[in-house]
Image (cartoon, helix red, strand yellow):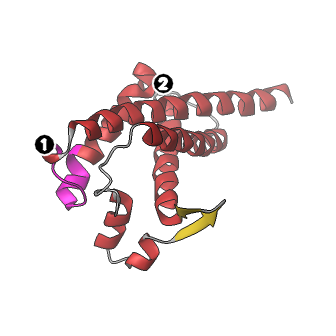
């Protein structure tokens, strides 16, 4: 059953907030259980995808320095862009179709993982076929996507509730 009305602006703000914070959670998770071998991380999937569409290596491997560490700015932009895009989509979709929240968004996260890591990116030649990826990659990415969407869902629900409650009081 679709919800007849909801505050689209609040859902959008909530989704962006959830996307940024859940992107940080996913980044932290990948530091604990890296999804790729060091060799495959030389050019990570976001960098590879950009290179496939013609973006030069000088851009895909661009870095900035913070506290003596070289950090991959283009990879971070892609990471947070992906995270925020799907968190916003989920925030809007879940408000319109409340039954979509089944599994506290874990199913949505696993669906995104399956779609991108087992179908889209291998089909594009960006990453190896799923059967050619190490088990550690599947474990890290599957759990990471669940944690990512749980966080996006929780944060966006909280932000949405606070934004809409404030309007109701006025």
Q: Which residues are magenta?
A: 118-130
Please tell me which residue is depicted at 54% across the width and 31% down the height of the picture.
Answer: 151
Q: Where residue 117 sits in the image (x, y, percent)?
A: 27, 46
User: Is the magenta region chiefly helix, strand or loop?
Assistant: helix
Residue 1: image quadrant is: top left
Position of 49 relative to 157 (above/below):
below
Q: Farthest residue in the left direction?
A: 131
The picture places residue 51, in percent across and down from the top left corner, at 33, 72
Residue 76 image point, x, y percent: 51, 57
Q: Is residue 64 above or below residue 54?
A: above
Nearer to the camera, 27 or 4: 27
Q: Is label 1 in a helix, a strand or a loop?
A: helix
Residue 135 is left or right of residue 104, and the answer is: left
Looking at the image, is mark 1 or mark 2 nearer the viewer? 1
User: What residue is shown at x 50% (from left), y 41% (from top)?
Assistant: 87
As for residue 122 lying within the magenta part, the answer is yes
On screen, residue 139 versus residue 83, left or right, reads left
Residue for badge 1:
131
Q: Is residue 141 left or right of residue 169?
A: left
70 relative to 155, above or below? below
Q: Residues within 10 Å of mark 1 (few under 14, many from 20)?
A: few
Secondary structure at numbered mark 2: helix
For this view, does 126 lie left or right of residue 68?
left
Structural distance between the alpha carbons of marks 1 and 2: 35 Å
Task: Return the residue found at the far right.
Answer: 170
Q: Nearer the viewer, residue 38 or 13?
A: 38
Choose the circle earlier in sequence order: 1 or 2: 2
- The residue identified by callout 2 is 98
């Amino acid at each position: 059953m679709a919800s007849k009305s909801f505050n689209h602006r609040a859902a959008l703000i909530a989704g962006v907030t959830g996307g940024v914070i859940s992107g940080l959670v996913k980044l932290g998770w990948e530091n604990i259980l890296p999804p790729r071998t060091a060799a495959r991380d030389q050019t990570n999937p976001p960098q590879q995808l950009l290179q496939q569409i013609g973006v030069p290596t000088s851009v895909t491997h661009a870095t900035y320095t913070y506290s003596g560490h070289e950090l991959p700015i283009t990879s971070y932009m892609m990471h947070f862009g992906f995270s925020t895009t799907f968190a916003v989509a989920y925030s809007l979709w879940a408000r319109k179709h409340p039954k979509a929240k089944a599994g506290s968004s874990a199913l949505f996260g696993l669906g995104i993982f399956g779609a991108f890591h087992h179908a889209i990116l291998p089909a594009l030649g960006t990453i190896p076929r799923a059967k050619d990826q190490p088990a550690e990659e599947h474990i890290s990415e599957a759990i990471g996507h669940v944690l990512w969407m749980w966080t996006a869902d929780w944060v966006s629900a909280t932000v949405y509730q606070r934004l809409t409650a404030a309007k109701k009081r006025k």
